Amino acid sequence: MLRPHLPRRGFKALFSAACCAVLGAGLLAGAGSATAQQQADAAPKAAGSKVVGYFTEWGVYDRNYHVKNVDTSGSADKLTHINYAFGNVQGGKCAMGDSYAATDKAYTADQSVDGVADTWDQPLRGNFNQLLKLKKKHPDLKILWSFGGWTWSGGFGEAAKDPAAFAQSCYDLVENSKWADVFDGIDIDWEYPNACGLTCDTSGREAYKNLMAALRSKFGGDYLITSAIPADASEGGKLDAADYAGAAQYVDWYNPMTYDFFGAWDAQGPTAPHSPLTSYDGIPKASWHSSATIAKLKEMGVPASKLLLGIGFYGRGWTGVTQDAPGGTATGPAAGKYEQGIDDYKELKSKCPATGTVGGTAYARCGNNWWSYDTPQTIAGKMDYKNQQGLGGTFFWELSGDTSGGELIKAIN
């Protein structure tokens, strides 16, 4: 789930082998080597190098995280793409989220990416202008405007009734002449098509594919079109509710949200890591881990090169816990800086340092609080998995959760 923390191309490696034997003078016969073919089949596909990070529009307020921080933390040097979150979906159309933060907020010289202060009469200020400055400094960086998210996905059902009109509205907004050079594409974060998130959608299984087809038809091949999709690999779960395999032809890549598998919405536990890479003894739900998500999507026919591995730059936690290992009981969500049951990595690394690992991610018990989150070490393990699976890259939620020196993003390769 891409939740506000509010009060809140890759390519396949090709292999071939043949054995040649001299059967007589001047006569050659080629024979396929079974051993070589088996090795080729078992070898991983070439992994992609996309690194996609979400930048939250509201982060400029309580979090005091600005576009300049993407640069000063070293994150901009690692990123290939930024997803700007979120635009809204209202009345069947793409709409602005917080227009003040996006286009009006004035930046002083010390707050600005290039050290130049905004003036009162310039046509564009806010995050959008700062993103333009960031792109000028990092010309290979691409930016997509993300629409929806956990809070603003309720409007997609109406949009699905007229996909062409929705696509036109999104194109007109993304390419508004005032900020036409900011965005290189659009990211759709519908939570969830034909399933329940904050609200329940009943658009039908084909609605998502039709919406993505309309977006590709309108934006054409020069724009990036991506989408955050559910990670629920259970039989009859959210991945089965919409035609993600059929829609894959229209997207440049998918961002399966391989985090938030478990959390303190189950107030009494059992405690479990929110972003396990693999299963482990005692996992509360058998298929609720990243490798099951990726395996299911590949089995559905989605190319590995169009799948990015999702990582959370935050932890989820419980309080009232007496057991160190996962699987313990709890009394409710642990206190977080901005919201109950969730906190940034930059906070947790010092207030509740990791004490163990399970399922390829870390956990910590400090006092009666129990947290799970990824560390540079567990991210390194996830990168090994990403490479072995030949995935298109990595994405994460979200930039402000990292340290000021970019500890987590520097572990992504």
Image (cartoon, helix red, strand yellow):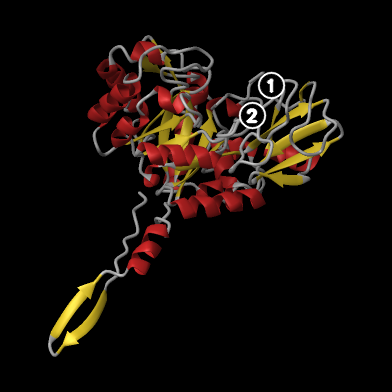
Residue 360 in the image: state x and y as whole percent.
63, 46
Residue 249's tag is none
Apparent side of residue 78 relative to residue 159 in the rendered image (left or right): right
Question: Seen from this angle, which residue lies furthest left?
Answer: 26
Q: Amino acid at mark 2?
A: Phe
Pointer 2 residue? 262
Residue 10 in the image: state x and y as whole percent.
37, 51
Residue 266's tag is 1
- Identify the image quadrant of residue 90: top left
Disc 2 crowd, CA 10 A, few/some/many (<14, 14-19, 20+): many
Residue 220 in the image: state x and y as whole percent.
24, 33
Q: Determine contact: label 1, label 2, CB under 8 Å.
A: yes
Name the image quarter holding the N terminus: top right
Q: Is residue 401 above or below residue 9?
A: above
Question: Seen from this angle, which residue lies furthest front?
Answer: 23
Residue at image position (24%, 72%) is 31
- Identify the image quadrant of residue 91: top left
Residue at image position (23%, 28%) is 217
Where disc 2 sits, the SS reads: loop
